[in-house]
Amino acid sequence: MSDEYNQQNTPLEAQSSENMSGSSGAPPSKDIDYVRPAEIPEQDLYHSHSFITKWIFCQDAKVIGIQYFLTAVFTGIVGLILSWLMRLQLGYPDLVPFITAEHYYQFVTMHGMIMVVYFLTALFLGGFGNYLIPLMVGARDMVFPYVNMISFWMFFIAVCVLMASFFVPGGPTGAGWTLYPPQAILPGTPGENMGIVLMLVSLGLFVIGFTMGGLNYIITILQARTRGMTLMRMPLTIWGIFTATALAMLAFPALLVSAIMMTLDKMLGTSFFMPTIMQAGEVLNYGGGSPVSFSIFFGSLVTLKFIL
C-alpha cells in the first residue's frame, strides 16, 4: 500500500521532447532545465526606446503615472509658496508690503484651486492610479494606453494655462476658489479680465483630460483583471481609486458645463449665471441668469472632495 502511494505522488519534472522519445533506442533521460520555445515572438508593445518615446509619446502606465506625479508635485509646490505668502502677509504685513489686498485675494483663490483640483486629484488618482492599477489587478497595462497618454497631456496643458494667468495683465482671478458669479466676472474683482478666462479654460481642459483617464481606470479595473482577481479579492487601494474615480465621473461633467457657461457669460455676454445687475446706476447687459445654478454645479465638486 505504501509503495503504491509513493509511486502515485512522485513529483513530475519537465522533459524535452527529444529525450522523452529516446530516438536511439536508449531509455529516456530527464531534462529538468529544458524550456519549450515560445510559440509566438515576444511582443514589445509600446515601451520606450528614446527620450521622446519615453517622456512625450509614451503609453506606458507607469511612466504616465510618474508624469502625473511630478506635474502634480510642481503645482503643489506653487500652492505651498502661495500659502506661505498669505501667512506672511497676515503675520507680518510690514515685512511683505508688496502683497496688496488684491494680491491676497488672488493668492487665496489660486492656492485653493491648485490644492483641491490640480494637486490632490491629479496626484492620488492620476499618479497613484496609473502606477498601481495595472500592478495590483494583474493587467499588462491600461486598456486604452493612447487615451491614457492624451489624458496626461490635457492635464499638462491645463496646468500651463493656469500658470499663464500669473503673467497676464491684472494677474490671476481673485474671486475665491469657488469662482461664484456674478462677482467672478464683474469689474472690480482682481483678475476679472484674462485671469478668470484662463482659470475657466484651464478647468475645462482639466475635466476633459480627467474624464478620459477616469474611464480608463474604471474599465481597466472592471475588464482587465487577471484570472482569479475577483472584485472581492481586489486590494483596498484599488477599491479606493475605483470609488473616487466613479464619484469624480459624476461630479466633474457638471463642473465642465459650468465652466463653459461662465466663459460664455464673460466673453459673449450671455446670462446663464448673471441676473439683472445695476452698476453705478446703470443696468448691465445681463438678465435672467441664476447665480445659484453655478453654486449647485460647483457644489457637486465640493461634495465629492469632502467625501474623498
Image: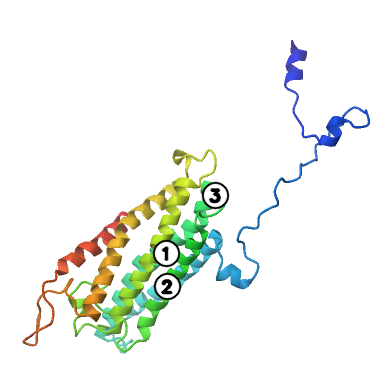
What percent of the width, then of the height, locates residue 165? Answer: 35, 82
Q: How far is mark 1 from mark 3, CA to CA? A: 22 Å
Q: Amino acid at mark 2?
A: Thr
Q: Quadrant of residue 217?
A: bottom left
> In the image, which disc is placed on residue 139?
3
**Residue 19 appears at what percent x and percent y?**
86, 34
Q: Quadrant of residue 269?
A: bottom left
Q: How far is mark 2 from mark 3, CA to CA?
A: 30 Å
- Residue receiving disc 1: 122
Q: Secondary structure at mark 1?
A: helix
Mark 1 and mark 3 lie on one chain; the one further toward the N terminus is 1
Which quadrant, please, contains the C terminus? Answer: bottom left
Say if 63 sits above or below 181 in the image: above
| Mark 2 neighbour density, 10 Å: few (under 14) some (14–19) many (20 or more) | many
Quarter in which the N terminus is drawn: top right
Q: Amino acid at mark 1?
A: Ala
